[in-house]
């Protein structure tokens, strides 16, 4: 395609975004033959040139041998690429670094470092990190229990599309934990959680729905059905 032609031209001149786009096309077979080894070559070039998206992808490749590139699983190399991206503010890479430390992947567990990187990822908009931080404040893991901060991070995570956070936030609104009780908000987030596969949200939907007028319930149900998470 014409787009591929210009990506090739730009990549030949060292344009890192063109290198990454070519890598993605070789990885997915979109506009080019699916060729994992060629994809890896272009990801590596973009990553070495400093593109955080490419560095994150390289970390993912070495973490799971993603895309069948056949480089083999190597936690140390994966960590190194994730760290390069994380140091440039890549939220998902920061969350991956937190998981390495929390779970002791290829290293000793370090909950202090896990918390530091979870907080960085959460501040930069990673919804899984935001949910993890909400749970930490909710249950007092590694820090003082704080229901206000728990609800704050659950809301951030829910707005970013984390279904478990939607459910927990609905409970917060039902019980008035960290937020003022609000049955409309509870009903909306419970419906959104249910739409995203959290079946335990159904009792909240049923119970809270009875506290609203039929018109209110239907309006909120429609809002939940059409709701989309915020982009970071």
Image (cartoon, rainbow, N blue to C red):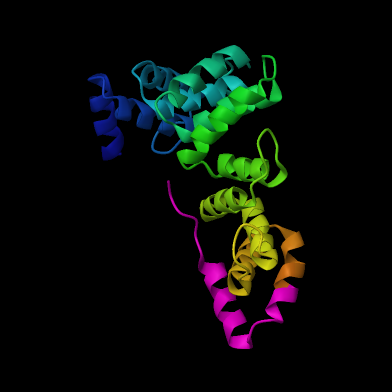
Residue at coordinates 52% horizontally, 72% vertically from top-left? 223
Q: Is residue 147 left or right of residue 125?
A: right
Magenta residue check for 223: yes
Q: Is residue 150 visible?
A: yes
Q: Is residue 21 left or right of residue 185?
A: left
Counting from the top left corner in percent of width and height, residue 83 is at: 49, 20
* Front-lying residue, 195 or 140: 140
Counting from the top left corner in percent of width and height, residue 18 is at: 30, 29
Q: Is residue 37 visible?
A: no
Magenta residue check for 229: yes
Residue at coordinates 67% horizontally, 56% vertically from top-left? 168
Question: Which quadrant of the figure has residue 176?
Answer: bottom right
Q: Which residues are magenta?
A: 206-232
User: Image quadrant for the N terminus?
Assistant: top left
**Image label count:** 0
Question: Which quadrant of the figure has residue 76?
Answer: top right
Counting from the top left corner in percent of width and height, residue 164 is at: 66, 52
Question: Which quadrant of the figure has residue 132?
Answer: top right
Secondary structure mostly taken by the magenta-highlighted segment of the chain: helix
Counting from the top left corner in percent of width and height, residue 63 is at: 60, 22
The residue at the far bottom in this view is: 214
Looking at the image, is 118 positioned above or below residue 168? above
């Amino acid at each position: 395609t014409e787009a591929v032609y210009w990506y090739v031209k730009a990549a030949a001149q060292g344009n890192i975004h063109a290198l990454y786009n070519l890598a993605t096309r070789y990885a997915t077979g979109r506009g080019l033959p699916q060729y994992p080894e060629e994809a890896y070559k272009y990801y590596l070039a973009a990553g070495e040139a400093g593109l955080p998206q490419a560095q994150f992808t390289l970390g993912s490749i070495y973490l799971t041998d993603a895309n069948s590139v056949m480089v083999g699983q190597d936690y140390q190399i994966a960590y190194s690429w994730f760290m390069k991206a994380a140091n440039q503010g890549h939220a998902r890479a920061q969350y991956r670094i937190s998981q390495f430390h929390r779970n002791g992947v290829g290293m000793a567990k370090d909950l202090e470092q896990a918390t530091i990187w979870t907080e960085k990822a959460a501040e930069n908009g990673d919804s899984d990190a935001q949910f993890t931080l909400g749970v930490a404040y909710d249950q007092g893991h590694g820090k003082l229990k704080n229901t206000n901060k728990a609800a704050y991070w659950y809301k951030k995570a829910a707005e970013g599309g984390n279904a478990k956070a939607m459910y927990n936030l609905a409970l917060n609104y039902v019980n008035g934990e960290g937020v003022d009780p609000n049955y409309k908000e509870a009903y909306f987030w419970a419906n959104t959680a249910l739409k995203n596969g959290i079946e335990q949200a159904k009792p909240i939907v049923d119970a809270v729905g009875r506290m609203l007028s039929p018109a209110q319930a239907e309006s909120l149900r429609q809002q939940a059905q059409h709701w989309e998470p915020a982009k970071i």
